[in-house]
């Protein structure tokens, strides 16, 4: 494991913090408040992408998924029906990364969007249709 491998988690955390700032901090997910724990849920999602996405299946060192970045986070309205189910927050997030397309033998970028929902038991994630990268607004 090289120095760059050791620094990768810190770089990812820094990028996630920058993404939160770009959205005015509304969906930052920091230590406390409405979005507490969101950053951890996003890191778990990243690990799931690494484990399951076809662009991340290569075992060759220079073909692994890397450069994960939270492109955007945007709060969604919690409806009265959501509140009745215990939902306290909803956030749509888009993540980007670079991977390797084994079929066509070339690097390729990947993107996924997800909606995170917070209840008293924590954050859950569901797939979300594509969003605009700059704002996380629905296409």
Image (spheres, helix red, strand yellow):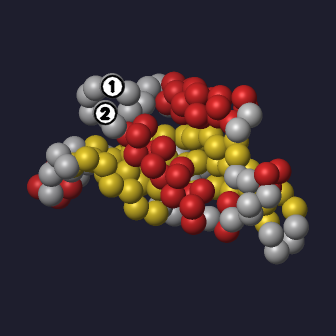
From what the image shows, is residue 86 above or below residue 53?
Answer: above
> In x, y percent, where is residue 46?
54, 50
| Residue 22 located left or right of residue 37 | right
- Say whether residue 16 is visible: yes
In-front residue for pair 13/94: 13
Residue bearing the label numbered 2: 36
The circle drawn on residue 85 is none
Q: Which quadrant is the N terminus positioned in?
A: top right
User: In the figure, residue 56 lies in which quadrant?
Assistant: bottom right
Q: CA distance from mark 2 to mark 1?
A: 6 Å
Residue position for label 1: 31
| Contact check, label 2 and label 1, Cβ < 8 Å | yes
- Quadrant housing residue 3: top right
Residue name at image x 38 percent, y 56 percent: 125
Kindly state the secondary structure of the residue where label 2 is placed.
loop
Relative to 101, residue 11 above or below: above
Query: Percent position (x, y) of residue 75?
Result: 39, 41
Is residue 46 or residue 64 the one in the foreground?
64
Please state the horizontal and vertical placement of residue 111, each as a whole percent of the image. Answer: 64, 55
Q: Nearer the viewer, residue 111 or 122?
A: 122
Say few, some or many: other residues with alpha carbon within 10 Å of mark 2 (under 14 / 14 to 19 / 20 or more): some
Mark 2 / mark 1, whichever is N-terminal: 1
Q: Does residue 26 appear anywhere in the picture?
A: no
Furthest-left residue in this view: 84
Residue pictured at 38% horizontal, 33% vertical: 29
Task: Tell me if residue 136 comes above or below residue 85 in the rendering.
Answer: above
């Amino acid at each position: 494991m090289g120095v760059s491998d050791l620094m990768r988690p810190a770089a990812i955390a820094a990028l996630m913090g920058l993404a939160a700032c770009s959205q005015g901090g509304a969906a930052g997910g920091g230590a406390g408040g409405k979005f507490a724990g969101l950053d951890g849920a996003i890191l778990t999602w990243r690990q799931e992408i690494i484990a399951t996405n076809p662009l991340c299946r290569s075992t060759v060192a220079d073909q692994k998924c890397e450069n994960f970045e939270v492109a955007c986070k945007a709060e969604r309205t919690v409806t009265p029906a959501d509140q009745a189910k215990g939902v306290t927050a909803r956030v749509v997030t888009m993540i980007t990364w670079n991977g390797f397309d084994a079929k066509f033998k070339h690097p390729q970028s990947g993107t996924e969007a997800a909606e995170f929902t917070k209840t008293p038991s924590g954050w859950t994630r569901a797939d979300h249709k594509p969003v605009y990268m700059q704002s996380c607004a629905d296409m």
